[in-house]
Image: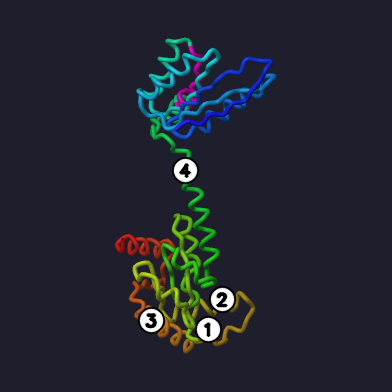
Amino acid sequence: MEEEIKIEDKNFPVPKVFVVSDSIGETAELVTRAAASQFDSGNVEIKRFPYVTDKEYIDEIIEEARLEKYSIIVATIILPDVRDYLIGKANMLGIPIVDIMGPMMAAFSKVMKISPKLEPGLVRKLDEEYFKKIEAIEFAVKYDDGKDPRGLPRADIIFIGVSRTSKTPLSMYLAHKRYKVANVPLVPEVVPPDELFQQPSSKIIGLTINPEQLFEIRKERLKSLGLNERANYASLKRIMEELDYADKIMNQLGCRVINVTNKAVEETASKVLEIIKRGK
């Protein structure tokens, strides 16, 4: 795989820079363009060689660079044997070479007193993990509290349960671990969406709780909102009705159920992941 970018300039010789990387070569190209911009023309011809992980490929690159009048090699190679081989061949033929990664890793190793992982493309992998997390968080927000049942087929995990059983906190916690999570509240007066019954039970988790604890949680919730704590929402009779209804739906779906009574979000999340992994 090669990417070639040519820029013509009639007043100055245009150096041909061979960007050699064991990843995609973006870093080396950015450094090359930054350096070239400091010269009057700023023109440079770049030929990128990504995913270089063996010496045979380097021999081909060196041979091509040798035939150019104004060639430079810029390298971001992590693997020491491949990097040293490239540097040695370039020096032997008098081709200017800039090794970006070698000195940087040597400096970090000296200060941190540990060896590098020597894993090509690690920065890109870290970037991908970051964007997966952002995507999962956005998913959890969009499909929170049954807002849009069309998201259920795309979810990795679906929580169901009555109000105040930690569905949203759990969804957000697991989203930070890059799981796409949706949740659906179970209310006796509202029929669950058809999409819920079309999902495999292995990715649905029912959340239940001790009625007395839920009573206290809801009572405190009403207080914090400045509402009458004796409202039907916080009555023990209403809570029992909701929990009975939720039990019926969970039994109908055949999903696993977790009792979140006195459990921290982290503890419940750990249990959820155990269930999900066993179900795969």
Looking at the picture, which amino acid does disc 4 mark?
Leu
* Disc on the earlier residue, 2 or 3: 2
Residue extending farthest to the bottom is: 237
Looking at the picture, which amino acid does disc 1 mark?
Ala
Dot 2 corresponds to which residue?
221
Q: Position of residue 90 (x, y in %)?
A: 44, 15
* Disc on the earlier residue, 3 or 1: 1
* Disc on the earlier residue, 3 or 4: 4
Q: CA distance from mark 2 to mark 1?
A: 9 Å
User: What stretch of residues is rendered in magenta?
Assistant: 95-105
Specify few, some or many for label 1: CA neighbours under 10 Å numbering under 14, 14-19, or 20 or more. many
**Relative to residue 80, is residue 164 depicted above or below?**
below
* Disc on the earlier residue, 4 or 2: 4
Dot 1 corresponds to which residue?
234
Dot 3 corresponds to which residue?
247
* Disc on the earlier residue, 2 or 1: 2
Specify few, some or many for label 3: CA neighbours under 10 Å numbering under 14, 14-19, or 20 or more. some
Dot 4 corresponds to which residue?
126
Q: CA distance from mark 2 to mark 3?
A: 23 Å
Q: Marks 1 and 2: in contact by CB < 8 Å?
A: yes
Residue extending farthest to the left is: 278
Identity of the residue drawn at 49% across and 76% down? 185
Looking at the picture, which amino acid does disc 2 mark?
Arg
Q: CA distance from mark 4 to mark 1?
A: 45 Å
Looking at the picture, which amino acid does disc 3 mark?
Asp
Q: Quadrant of residue 280?
A: bottom left
